[in-house]
Amino acid sequence: MNDIQFKKDLTSSRIQLALTYLDTEFIDELIEQLKTVMFSSNSKWHARRVVIEFVQYSYSCTTTT
């Protein structure tokens, strides 16, 4: 397995595990925090990238299970 595929698989696994334990009470707060990171002028590009990846993996994990 190459390094790039391994990183993608690891990220996907972490997201799936996180979503397993995500309590629905915290979803609104999570969304607010994600918006803060995405739209803050102080956010670094890699922080924004992590948020985008999190949302993409979260969506794909919830739609495929």
Image (cartoon, rainbow, N blue to C red):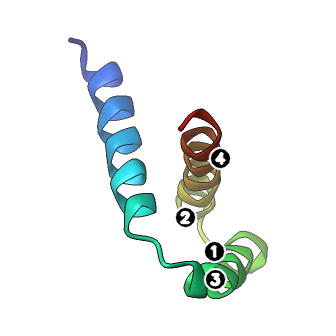
Q: x, y (%) of residue 51?
A: 60, 60
Label 3 CA crowd tier, 10 Å (few <14, some 14–19, many 20+): few
Asked if residue 24 is positioned above or below residue 19 in the image, the reply reads below
Query: Front-most of 48 and 33?
Result: 33
- Is the Cβ of the residue at disc 2 closer than 8 Å to that at disc 1? yes
Q: Dot 1: few (<14), some (14–19), or many (≥20) neighbours within 10 Å?
A: few
Which residue appears farthest toward the top when viewing the image? 1
Q: Is 37 situated left or right of 3 in this image?
A: right
Residue labelled with disc 4 = 59
SS class, disc 4: helix
Q: CA distance from mark 2 to mark 1?
A: 6 Å
Q: Residue at x 53, y 38 (%)?
A: 65
Secondary structure under tag 2 reads helix
Q: Residue at x 71, y 84 (%)?
A: 32
For badge 4, the amino acid type reads Tyr
Marks 3 and 4: which is nearer the front? 4
The one of 39 and 13 positioned closer to us in this rendering: 13
Give amino acid for label 3. Answer: Gln
Q: Amino acid at mark 1?
A: Ser
